[in-house]
Image (spheres, coloured by chain):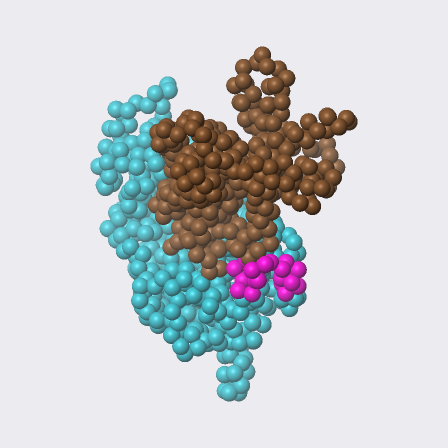
Amino acid sequence: MTAMESGSLLVILATAIAFATPLVFACIGETITERAGVINLSAEGTIMLCAMVGFVAAKVTDNVWVGFVAAAIIGALIALIVAYGAITLKQSQIAIGFVLALLCSDLSAYLGNPYVRVPGPTVPPRFPIPILQDIPLIGPLFFREGDILVYAGYLLIIAAWFYFYRTRGGLTLRAIGEQPAAAFARGHNVIALRYAYTMIGGALMGIAGAAFSLDFKAGWSYRHTAGYGWIALAIVIFGGWNPLRVALGAYLFGVLQSLASVVQSAIPDLPTQMFTVAPFVLMILVLVLTSSDWLDRLLNYLPVNARRAFLRAIHAAPPAALGRPFEQD
Amino acid sequence: MKVELHHIHKHFGNVHANDDVSLTVEAGTIHGLLGENGAGKSTLVKILSGFITRDSGEIILDGRPAHIQSPADALRYGIGMLHQDPLDFPPLTVVENFMAGSLATPALLNARAAERTFSALCRQFNFDIDPQARVGDLTVGERQQLEIVRLLANGAGTLILDEPTTGISASQKTLLFDALRRLAREGKSIIFVSHKLEDVEELCDCVTVMRRGRVVGELTLRDTPTKRAADGQPAGKHVNVAARIVEMMFGKELAMPVKPATHQDEVILTLDGLILRNDRLEMSIEHLSVQRGEVIGIAGLEGSGQQLFLLTCAGLERPAGGSIRVGERDLTHKPYADFVKAGVCYLPADRLRDGLISGLTIQEHVALRMSGKGIFIDRAAAAKEAERAIATFNIRGQPDTTVERLSGGNQQRTQLALMPSPLNVLLMEHPTRGLDIESTLWVWQQLIARCNQGTAIVFASSDLDEIVQYSDRVIVFSGGRISPPIAASELTADSLGHMIGGRF
């Protein structure tokens, strides 16, 4: 492999990681929420409205970090509406989330209209990490081209995984999503915890929105982040509610997007819309394939032990109480 | 830990689930809480474990008043409860379940240390559970063992077990009882909630019997070791305990029979060498023949196989052996449709879940039953039929009322209205459960009218008065056996109590 080819492959992958970073925030946020037993289906609208709010707040104060804080707060507030409707009013989480998704995306178009295509502040680019960037292969790929958000994304994934599987709080989080009555019997305040995790998840989705408008898709335009919320919801399912696998899904989507832009420059005759849409279509195909019986049938040819390990890796049951309100009698 | 409950009251809507209930459980004893379904025993223990908040009354632990408003409070006082359906986390591993909600779990999990503690406790009780197994893959008995070990690790001084012997194997039951006896010897108090007489008799030191939300009696089955030593008496069971408990559970006086003689000489239902079997029960009936117009009552503690028997007679369960004949037709192993054609009808106890279709209106139920031609519903005919049913059966509702909005009595009236006519054999579970007196009388009027037309009725009920009043003959299910039929007129409270206690 020549230096140039490996260089361009590196560029593709580094771009993929950048593309995927906002999705990492959104997906981990949704994973936390769903693990607690609540579906926040408003991701599409939350991300879009928070992208707008983050951009405007950063522009007005001329400080990107204010933009992120504002976006996180709005994201948490939208999640609070979901939590109130789902946990306290015990209404359909699907309906609440869906209506909010539509409402918030339209709201972003209406409120953000004056800011369409105006220049604004962005996160400082390229922030190589000393020492780590010098590790062969891994260094240039993960620790040289990225900015601070990319690294925050890595930390978030590891922190989420560690919290889920290595701390008492994480065990409780999984417990309330699986069998809230049992968690209640063990002395946990299921209602308060579900509120808290739904809002934390919403705040992360808000940060995902600001990560688009202040960094990876800088600026604001009509329906600036269209489609990312829905794909985030799909990736969470594909990732089996496990932070590491969910993150893998998000990065896979980044690779598809990155490839699409490379192919686009190679075949300039095709309409550009095709390349914007292609990663979504491909991602859905991947999701369908990994969750269909077809794969199971294929796996039957594997030896028993390998098959079992593989099945465990690709199959995951959703939290048993996902989408169901907790009835405390 | 000594547990005292004083004057506990709890209402659910109009139902007085606990009416001035007081209970004392001494430290180091196993205390049975016995009663039929709906007697209020689960409510009482859920109040003690903080799952339900009481309306009024006092909880005193070791002489000090306790403020228990939530499970978290109860755990702090050292009260642990094993729920009837295991309340755990099936997708998590055993050791994760053990750690979840434990006060001893550090903020950063230490799975290996937890596993050591868990295994050590398991060894003490001869429990054998793989700490890495998924809880969902364990048997109910093993999940129970896990819960016991978990609660003990949390420092429980009082253990409440709600119907723990349902769904576990005989060897697991032995293990469980050994563990409970051991815990009692260590000074812990155990509350054992059950409706199974034989379990309570085998295990408990004292028993409190509840009926309709009240305590109706208390009995010491064994003297506790300390008391025995003081009295210098040998340990031993009091004689004839079962009969006395049954008397408390069902009341001493039996009502007088009121049913007119309606039976005719033609035999309509014949069972020969019938063998009933499911996961938990195996029982047989040598021979039973029921005449047209006759009413057979089935008595026995709940879950003694009455439902399996009725389902088998209705063609909804296959018998493991023997034959079922309706009139001249041999229906053994025939499909349910043949039973229906032969004029057999089954009315289940859970009217809304098994009997009616919630979400559909009375008129739609009528339309479903009508023999339709073509693909369209004859709305006019269905409406007329529904109006007629509502008028004749005195249902408080409109043709377009959905069935779940009807009261229990009106649901039962709707079920009766939907029964086909003529009918040869009617099988019922708890025909009047949850109904007020007026509806109860009315339902039996309708049933007796059916008898006069030649229908034979076989019904199970937990209300002994109902059985004695309306049956011609009674059979008793107890301890895996079925008694030969006895004429209702020859029954006494005593003989019936003996039989339900398993002595016939």
Q: Within the magenta stretch, is there residue A252?
A: no
Query: From this viewpoint, which residue is outermost toward the front?
Result: A62
The residue sitting at 52% across, 83% down in the picture is: B226
In front here: B111 or B358? Answer: B111
Q: Chain A drawn in what color?
A: brown
Chain identity for the colour cyan used in the image: B
The residue sitting at 41% across, 78% down in the picture is: B63
Q: Within the magenta stretch, is there residue B100?
A: yes
The quarter of the displayed image where residue A99 is located: top left
* Rendered position, B81 above or below A148: below
In front here: A281 or B402? Answer: A281
Q: Which residues are magenta?
A: B97-118
Q: Is residue A43 left or right of residue A235?
A: left
Query: From this viewpoint, which residue is outermost toward the top?
Result: A269
Q: Is residue A33 left or right of residue A109?
A: right
* Rendered position, B227 above or below B332: below
Q: Quadrant of the C terminus of chain A?
A: bottom left
In front here: B242 or A85? Answer: A85
- Where residue B70 sits: x, y (%)? 41, 62
The residue sitting at 57% across, 62% down in the picture is: B106
- Where residue A13 sits: x, y (%)? 65, 31
Q: Quadrant of the N terminus of chain A?
A: top right
Residue B149 visible in the current orientation: yes
- Where residue B284 sits: x, y (%)? 54, 51
In front here: B251 or A132? Answer: A132
Residue B462 visible in the current orientation: no
The quarter of the displayed image where residue B55 is located: bottom left
